[in-house]
Amino acid sequence: MTINALARMMVNRDRYQRQSATPNLPNGSLPSKGHVNPYYPESMNITGMKASDFKTIPVSKEVEEQVKDIAFQHMKKNYGMTDPNRSDLADAIKAYVSKIPEKDRVHAVRTLTNIHRAEAVKLDEFVKSRVPGWQVGQPFDTSILNEYRQGVDMKA
């Protein structure tokens, strides 16, 4: 290999690396000021929000029960795992937030997600109290869920 061929190869390597490098944004991963995401309404933009910026807001009892029922169905049908082919939780939340004021939508999503997570934890603890050593995803006799009462803390 000649020195010219070696130099040409190194120039091409440097050019390739510059092209494939990700741009250095001034704020880390934040988009530039004034950027509009065409896929989400402005009210759902959480860019730059911290956990302390979210509020727990009151939601309708109907959607709260629906979200808890979804957690129960995930436990019964998939042994605590969500079904990768269905988005029932996302669909329920999306249907609810489309009916409330825009300023509350981000907070409602967070509230409903937390309600679902809390119910899933209660179900997890309930099953573990009946089936020692059980782990999420492992099959178990789902008839024990007939004893479960939604909203009742099993530790008390």
Image: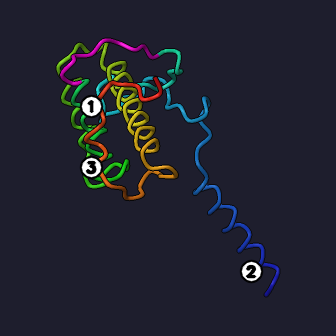
Q: Which residue lies most toward the right here? A: 3
Q: Amino acid at mark 1?
A: Val
Residue occupying the point 36% across, 21% down: 111
Q: Main secondary structure of the magenta part?
A: loop
For the residue pair 122 and 41, the one nearer the viewer reads as 122
Per the image, the residue denoted by label 3 is: 143
Task: Please tell me whether mark 2 sits on a helix, a strand or a loop.
Answer: helix
Q: Quarter-wise, where is residue 67 in the image?
A: top left
Q: Which residue lies most toward the bottom here? A: 1
Residue neighbourhood size for the residue with mark 2, other residues' Cα within 10 Å, grouped as few (<14), some (14–19), many (≥20):
few
Marks 1 and 2: CB-CB under 8 Å?
no
For the residue pair 98 and 110, the one nearer the viewer reads as 110
Image: magenta residue range: 54-63
Q: Quarter-wise, where is residue 101 in the image?
A: top left
Q: Amino acid at mark 2?
A: Ala
Q: CA distance from mark 1 to mark 2?
A: 65 Å
Q: Amino acid at mark 3?
A: Ser
Per the image, the residue denoted by label 2 is: 5
Marks 1 and 2, the one that precedes in the sequence: 2
Marks 3 and 1: CB-CB under 8 Å?
no
Q: Quarter-wise, where is residue 13 in the image?
A: bottom right
Residue occupying the point 22% across, 33% down: 92
Residue occupying the point 27% across, 49% down: 143
Q: CA distance from mark 3 to mark 2?
A: 73 Å
**Image x and y of residue 64, in percent:** 26, 24
Instruction: Reply yes or no: does residue 62 show up in magenta.
Output: yes
**Image x and y of residue 29, in percent:** 56, 35
Per the image, the residue denoted by label 1 is: 67
